[in-house]
Image: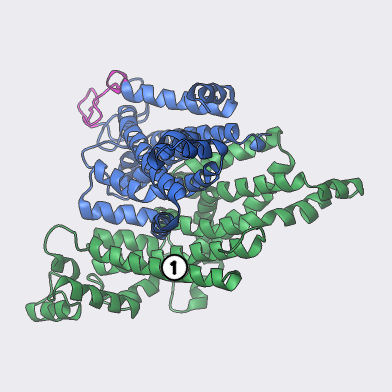
């Protein structure tokens, strides 16, 4: 059997297997912790009866293999327990933090991709010139620099010194955040979103830009580009109408990989910019020994990465007819 | 390609030369650190009238100023070079060896061996890197070796994927067929005939791995999980961040960050230059 549906089916199956193994890994990671594992899952401050109730709920009084199945069942049902610090269900806690991350990550990636496509195309077109050398060097500089350091310097320079941007957070203190539109769709939010997005984008732009550049260089050697030029079309027209369009394919796959890769950078970005997202949540929860929240957040990030790897694989197979599905 | 020729071509390339020069600079800094530092990096310094030098700006005595605790920034940054290089080189070496061996076995033997190893690689690709290292270090305790182990556990995946496809194509070449006909054992073919041909490509990814490992260690230290016994560049930045130094003491924030950037960039340069040597089509 072969063909696209078979290929997609197989990849989805693999993703599910990966997910199961990720849960298993989490199960063991949080149980090899030194000391009594129950203290990791049950708040030490709870009274004895409440403590026993929680132990029973998570089956921590049962043998390890039974614990494992219960753990699996709870995870699949989306029951990650209660947060030690806020005493809310973990899912509710994550619910508060997910949207800010989606907005920040979305705008970062969008900005990075647009800039990458434009600069990738231009550096390919003007290859061998000073312009290309400068753009590639700057992109590599930002790709090499630690994202949190760029964030710190940007805050010092642009926020503290020049007062162009807020010094972090999602809105000014005292903001009413009860309504969704009031929180996310106003100038104040965008103003806060801008600097972390620019810093994040500066970090991510190099990879898709270099992919775009190589792809453009390959396309530009094709006969049809020569032909368009020979027809007397304007240079700009040739670049954007013909070369760029045909070079976008590998960039699309790169984007999905980029988002998976961006999760780590997101953690640092959110810490430096005091952004209330899941990246900062995982750091805070580990620091406060809030293990239920930490492992659920880690699991969620794993789900995002696995899903995007899947998307990137399928897109790659779907968009590039040279790939054979086996 | 022979090692000697590879090095020669690398030094001929402008990017490669800058990368190698930067790397040698940092290695020299690390080796001669005890001779270069002007103060003990952990000692608190006081001015002549007995006051703690709290974030004192650069002067002839402290060429990169002092930290909030009155420690000499220049000496801390120089001392941090050692940690960065140990992390960078150890991780790069381990990642390259582990990644290449897995790729050789998977690519050469094919069948269920390949299936099993590649599915394992896919699984590792599903793990969010930085959060994983953070949790591992929180679990195992913040020591530099735990950080290195956690980094290596994830990072071999890239090398394996790339080297495996290279092994698949080398496997088809005539000299491998000839070795087979001569009756060489499989393991001998893999490690004596296939392996030397993938080493240059492994180096491309090894130099990238060096940079990535250094940034990851810095990030972990910045998040507060660094080895408390060591002065690393990430830890210096963490201290500066905690002390809100970004607005007052640029001399405390700029040097360690710049050092990380330059060292990581040198890895990029060497890697890109090696890649162009191996694949001349990428040349301008």
For residue A85, what is the image quadrant? bottom left
Q: Chain of mark 1?
A: A
- The x, y position of residue A238, in whole percent, is 82, 50
Judge by depth and name the residue closer to the eye, B180 or B170: B180
Residue at 44%, 27% (x, y): give it.
B23
Q: Can residue B35 be found in the magenta stretch? A: yes
- Tell which of B34 and B272 is nearer to you: B272
Quarter of the image that includes the C terminus of chain B? top right
Q: Which residues are magenta?
A: B32-52
SS type, badge 1? helix
Q: Is residue A314 above or below residue B196?
A: below
Colour chain A is painted in: green
Residue B71, horizontal then vertical, whole percent: 26, 32
Which residue is pictured at 51% across the width and 23% down the height?
B7
Residue B240 within the magenta-colored segment of the rendering: no
- B172 lies above or below A250: above
């Amino acid at each position: 059997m072969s063909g696209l549906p078979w290929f997609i089916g197989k990849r989805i199956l693999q993703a599910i297997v990966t997910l199961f193994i990720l849960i298993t890994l989490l199960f063991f990671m949080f149980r090899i912790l030194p000391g009594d594992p129950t203290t990791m899952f049950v708040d030490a401050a709870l009274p004895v009866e409440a403590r026993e109730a929680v132990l029973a709920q998570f089956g921590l009084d049962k043998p390890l293999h039974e614990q494992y199945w219960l753990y699996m069942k709870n995870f699949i049902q989306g029951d990650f327990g209660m947060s030690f610090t806020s005493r809310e269900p973990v899912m509710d806690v994550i619910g508060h933090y997910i949207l800010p991350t989606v907005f920040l990550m979305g705008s970062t990636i969008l900005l990075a991709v647009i800039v990458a496509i434009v600069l990738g195309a231009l550096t390919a077109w003007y290859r061998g010139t000073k312009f290309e050398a400068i753009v590639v060097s700057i992109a590599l500089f930002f790709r090499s620099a630690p994202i949190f350091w760029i964030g710190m310097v940007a805050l010092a320079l642009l926020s503290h010194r020049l007062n162009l941007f807020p010094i972090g957070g999602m809105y000014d203190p005292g903001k009413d955040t009860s309504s969704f539109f009031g929180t996310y769709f106003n100038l104040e939010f965008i103003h806060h979103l801008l600097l972390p997005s620019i810093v994040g984008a500066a970090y991510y732009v190099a990879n898709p830009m270099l992919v775009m550049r190589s792809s453009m260089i390959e396309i530009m050697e094709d006969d049809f580009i020569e032909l368009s030029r020979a027809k007397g079309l304007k240079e700009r027209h040739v670049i954007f109408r013909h070369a760029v369009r045909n070079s976008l394919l590998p960039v699309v796959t790169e984007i999905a990989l980029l988002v998976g890769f961006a999760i780590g950078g997101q953690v640092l970005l959110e810490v430096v910019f005091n952004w209330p997202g899941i990246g900062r949540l995982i750091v805070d929860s580990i620091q406060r020994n809030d293990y239920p929240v930490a492992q659920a957040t880690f699991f969620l990030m794993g789900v995002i990465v696995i899903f995007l790897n899947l998307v990137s694989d399928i897109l790659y197979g779907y968009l590039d007819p040279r790939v054979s599905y086996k | 390609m022979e090692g000697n020729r590879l090095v020669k071509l690398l030094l001929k390339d402008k990017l490669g030369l800058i990368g190698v020069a930067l790397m040698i600079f940092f290695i020299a800094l690390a080796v001669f650190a005890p001779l270069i530092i002007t103060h003990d990096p952990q000692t608190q310094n006081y001015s002549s009238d007995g006051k703690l030098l709290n974030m004192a700006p650069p002067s002839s005595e402290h060429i990169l100023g002092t930290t909030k605790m009155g420690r000499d920034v220049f000496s801390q940054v120089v001392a941090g070079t050692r940690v960065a290089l140990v992390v960078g080189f150890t991780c790069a070496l381990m990642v390259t060896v582990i990644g290449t061996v897995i790729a050789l076995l998977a690519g050469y033997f094919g069948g269920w061996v390949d299936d099993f190893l590649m599915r394992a690689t896919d699984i590792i690709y599903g793990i969010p890197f930085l959060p994983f290292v953070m949790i591992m270090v929180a679990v195992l305790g913040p020591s530099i070796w735990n950080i290195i182990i956690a980094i290596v556990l994830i990072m071999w995946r890239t090398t394996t994927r790339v080297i495996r496809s290279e092994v698949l194509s080398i496997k088809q070449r005539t000299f491998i067929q000839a070795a087979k006909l001569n009756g060489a054992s499989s393991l001998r073919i893999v490690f004596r005939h296939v392996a030397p041909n993938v080493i240059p490509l492994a180096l491309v990814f090894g130099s990238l791995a060096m940079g990535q490992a250094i940034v990851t260690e810095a990030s972990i230290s910045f998040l507060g999980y660094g080895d408390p016994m060591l002065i690393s560049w990430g830890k210096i930045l963490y201290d500066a961040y905690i002390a809100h130094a970004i607005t007052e003491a640029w001399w405390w924030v700029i040097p360690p960050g710049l050092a990380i950037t330059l060292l990581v960039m040198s890895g990029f340069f060497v890697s890109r230059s090696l890649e162009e040597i191996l694949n001349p089509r990428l040349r301008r």
